[in-house]
Amino acid sequence: MSQPAPARPGQRLEDVDTPALIVDLPGFEKNQRTLFDLVKNRVRVRPHAKTHKCPEVARRQIAMGAVGMCCQKVSEAEAMVDGGIADVLVTNEIVGAGKIERLAALSRRAKVGVCVDNADNLRAIAATGAKLDIYIEIDVGMRRCGVAPGKPAVELAKQITSFKNLRFAGLQAYHGRAQHMRSMEERHAAIEAAAQHVQHTKRLLAQEGIACPVVTGAGSGTFMLELEAGAWDEIQPGSYAFMDADYAKNEWAAPLPRFEHALFVLTTVMSRPSPHVAIVDAGLKASSVDSGMPGVWQREGLRYTHASDEHGWVEGKDVPALGDKLLLVPGHCDPTINLYDWYVCVRAGRVEALWPITARGAVT
Amino acid sequence: MSQPAPARPGQRLEDVDTPALIVDLPGFEKNQRTLFDLVKNRVRVRPHAKTHKCPEVARRQIAMGAVGMCCQKVSEAEAMVDGGIADVLVTNEIVGAGKIERLAALSRRAKVGVCVDNADNLRAIAATGAKLDIYIEIDVGMRRCGVAPGKPAVELAKQITSFKNLRFAGLQAYHGRAQHMRSMEERHAAIEAAAQHVQHTKRLLAQEGIACPVVTGAGSGTFMLELEAGAWDEIQPGSYAFMDADYAKNEWAAPLPRFEHALFVLTTVMSRPSPHVAIVDAGLKASSVDSGMPGVWQREGLRYTHASDEHGWVEGKDVPALGDKLLLVPGHCDPTINLYDWYVCVRAGRVEALWPITARGAVT
């Protein structure tokens, strides 16, 4: 259920009740410019809404030049279309009668694409009669969904072209595992291998006379590598807008830009059990710990060492006093954002806006 | 933001869209009877709403004999009072002017208790003029919040009695670490040690002529040990209602009862990349992985091996087919419930009710 807005415009950051999800607007805007200035006209940008879950963010990405949004769930795509986004690609397989009906209904309100990796699923989607862009997901190293590159993809493409209501829109080729490989060298190698799979599949499609309009994929940890590999037409970065503590552990070097931390959890010291320990009011229901603990922002010598459901342990030599507030850098931005109903957007120490996270909890 | 109801009464379980948070009503009701039959008249029961976040569950606990609800956050307590619960204890320190004002406002609508471990915080609470029950939290092994047992608690109790609007209601003595110690022997030892701290503190309070009306604490992993130790008047179990995969790893033996798994995440196989791997549509935004992966319910030989944000890997010898549905047992019930807006309550394979999780996301 929705929680009431946790702050009001004009309020000072230090007066915002905690825990609260904070967007540093100058950092967010800088990240937007960094990405779009770098890739402008070289590749289409379709940012991933799975990260931000918020039409206010999506509209700002579209204004920068994004062609539309990626979504991971039909309900997420519905929230984006409800929020005014006219072009959504569900970068995922949609299985089950109810979901497919909702996808078909959505295609009457917006331009909708979806991925397939199975012929039965393709027939179920075709049977709705809905006009949809169909992307074949190929597994380029993620080892999750997707058909194998090459012939299996071509076989599926032939079947797509047999349905009048469906358009073969291209390939989804996302190497999720590569995003968090720490060294540039590992990521380079992974994306080079993925590019070979894409190029091989495109050649086979061309031999069959099947046009492949778009190859889409890539994330914040690799997108320039896909761009330089030359096999992708569209990139899907999500985390670039905010960054997180896990992405910060990557090596960042050319051709990838360094993004700013623009997302924080504001927290209050609620207990001081010892001179070296402060207990804060943000635990694992306030900052997801699936990819590690949050970082403590701009406080040398302090570490957030562990979390229980509603508490966090901040330890170090100069721990803050009872009632003091700290900014935490979430370990993983996507599932942390999914815990909140509102972004509290801050500029120069004041709340400027509150953005509702309307796709929060959109799991179906 | 709230998601629409994910099912409708009368629907068959296998037709519910996924992922969905399922309550097995017979299992839940059995857990209720198991707990309340066992402790009836021997100790007060104040279940923890941090687990369920839902007034519908709270009302059923009150109907069984619970004296009120525990909450971890003011916003959680507000949701319970909004849902008709007349007696709430915030088992936590409440720090910060805004939160303390809200706590004071709530005390005009319900009987409200709160914990303190700091004299400055106590004065800030007293200054509101609100009538509140004040519990002193003592650290009995959790090493989180709380003053040390013994003299520090007595000093704080004296100060409480100096404020006319505040009532010293007793001690909060919760050993959270003990809940997940795997062997009965370890848990016995931990609760025995905690009981010594409680008894010592009560003796010192009595020597000062300060009555200690209630000692409250204990969780689902130990509550019978606290009861038998004789130092507690009230227990605070939460997870007992549902259980989870992490609690299932504990040794369960007398005097503790064994609770049923009554909480599940229903998920669909959305891709079958190999004969031994099924990809399901419930990832870490559908089942919190902070305490480990979910279990696969009643499917021998299948394991949920890892999760990404929106996907899970189920591996084994006889993996289900595309479109098949599975029930997962969440690794940790509390943060999993906090991801959903609705419980889909099922009996005999049919949806019987939908319960709104009104305190979902109540972090402040």
Image (tube, coloured by chain):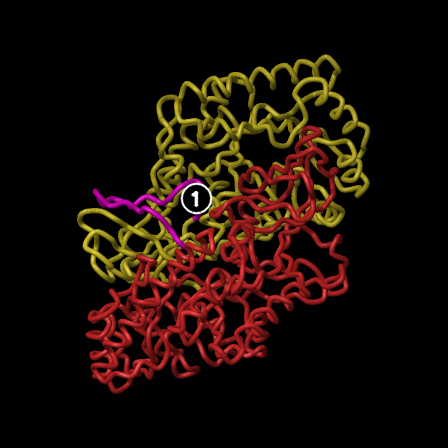
Chain colours: A red, B yellow
Occupied quadrant, residue A98: bottom left
Give the answer, above or below, for where B239 lies relative to B362.
above
Mark 1 belongs to chain: B
Q: Amino acid at mark 1?
A: Cys
Q: Residue at x 32, y 56 (%)?
A: B267
For the question of whether residue A112 can be seen, the reply is yes
Query: What's the residue at 65%, 65% (across, down)?
Result: A354
Res A218 → quadrant: bottom left
B46 is higher (above) or lower (below) than A230: above
Q: Is residue B275 above or below residue B42?
A: below
Where does label 1 land, which residue? B333
Q: In what element is the residue under mark 1?
A: helix
Q: Is residue B326 left or right of residue B127?
A: left
Q: Is A127 left, or right, of B45 in this rendering?
A: left
- Counting from the top left corner in percent of width and height, residue B199 is at 61, 16
Image quadrant containing the N terminus of chain B: bottom right
Q: Residue furthest bottom?
A: A164
> Which residues fall within the magenta stretch?
B288-308
**Residue B250 drawn at (x, y percent):** 38, 29
Please name whichever residue, B334 or B276, is drawn nearer the observer in this view of the structure.
Answer: B276
Please check the rendered image and state whether residue A74 is part of the magenta-colored stretch, yes or no. Answer: no
> Callout 1 environment at 10 Å: few (<14), some (14 to 19), or many (20+)?
many
Q: How far across and how far down the image is residue B89, in percent? A: 61, 38
Q: Residue A329 location in percent, x, y?
A: 60, 51
- Left or right, residue B360 beside residue B319: right
Q: Is residue B355 visible?
A: no
Q: Nearer the viewer, residue A219 or A321?
A: A219
How would you classify the magenta stretch by its main secondary structure?
Answer: loop
Most foreground residue, B293 or B227: B293
Residue A64 position by quadrant: bottom right
Seen at 73% across and 65% down, the residue is A9
Say if A129 sits above or below B306 in the image. Answer: below
